[in-house]
Amino acid sequence: MADGFDVRTTEASATAVEFAGISRTPAVTPHIAAIGVATPTQDYHQLYIDWAESRLSNERDRTLFRRMAAKAGIEHRWSVLEPITDFYAGDRFPSTRTRMEAYAAAAPRLALNAAADLAQKTRLDGVTHLVMASCTGFVAPGIDQILAAELGLVDAERTLIGFMGCYAAVPALRTAHHIVRSDPKARVLVIAVELSSLHLQEDNELQPLLAGLLFGDGAAAALVCAEPQGLALSNFSSQCLPNSQDLIRWAIGDQGFVMHLSGEVPGRIRHALAQPQLRQKLLGDLDPATLDAWAVHSGGRTVLDAVEDGLELSPQALNVSRQVLRDCGNMSSATLMFILSRQLERGARSGLALAFGPGLAAEGFQFRRAG
């Protein structure tokens, strides 16, 4: 009670409340109705392994690289470059300009394939908003405008989330979540598309070549709306881990985008997840043992191991994330939506989504089966 007003409202409230004589309805719960996914057709994982090994002059480094490649938990990675060997042929690797021209041509096509897959799973009429996430390319007019025109969404409100890295699907879905909560009639198309294979570097050192072992291309599209279908979204969280801003870096160079991925990342994640503060922010009062689904970004085998250890999960808890890693590698922001798509298909009831990226930052949300 404050100044004569009795305000008692929660998201779960079942009745309207009176505030200063104005009737307000309870907040809606946004849902991911369905998710569509797409990968290119060129599998370049073994090609990369052979190429990277040939660049290491030290036999000890080659032996270590072969061992790490065998233990990576990855069998396939896909590229829009067909054949990829032509794009990287010659004495000098392509300039950033050449790579961005390839992005402008290929990224919309792959994103449209994901949207077409989504259209097979749910109706896409009446889309009011388009939220795009991508960190592997820039083009203007933006990829959001290109896709809006291709999809006939010229009147849709557009938001472009760029250069946030592997966790960008969470801010994209969070943006859609806020839109639907403010306008229950909104139907938000969320698309993440990443072409990591455009950014292969002329490295001869073991550490960057090992980092390049992880990444592939992919796109995912989701419809977020108030209709109670698919997965209900709630409890979004965001946390930058202290003293870790240099562990994952992503810079624009003269020959593509250059990533720095420290070997300290898994250990830092493991330590952070063992701390009560981050656990509380991600899980609230939920007991991890009560969740039947985990959607943890497949940043790499050691990252998944770190999450499993830090949250004290069962060895099977991250199976879906490991399957996506095996089949597609790390597709940056698109990866989390691939995992959520598989969790939807297997009938997941309740779970936690979690992704890590530059910063080092952790982004997550809770989800549950509609109904």
Image (cartoon, rainbow, N blue to C red):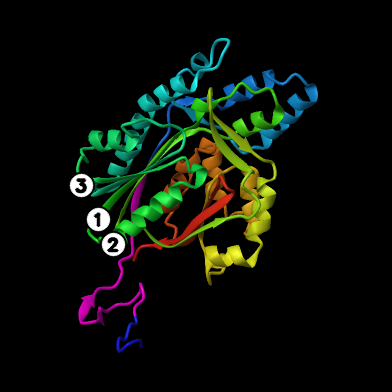
* Res 120 visible: no
Residue 125 - label: 3
Residue at position x 57%, y 65% in the image: 288
The x and y percentages for residue 185 are 22, 58
CA–CA distance in space, label 1 to label 3: 11 Å
Q: Mark 3, residues whose alpha carbon is within 10 Å: few (<14), some, or many (≥20)?
A: few
Give the CA separation, mark 1 to mark 2. 9 Å
Say which residue label 2 marks.
182
Mark 1 or mark 3: whose residue is earlier in sequence = 3
Q: Is residue 23 magenta?
A: yes
Q: Nearer the viewer, mark 2 or mark 3?
A: 2
Q: Are marks 1 and 2 in contact (CB under 8 Å)?
A: yes
The kind of residue tagged 1 is Ala
Q: Is residue 336 left or right of residue 201?
A: left
What residue lies at 29% left-to-right and 33% top-to-bottom?
A: 146
In this orientation, does residue 242 appear?
yes
- Residue segment shown in magenta: 9-36
Residue 147 position, x and y percent, is: 29, 35
Is the residue 252 above or below the residue 239 in the image?
above
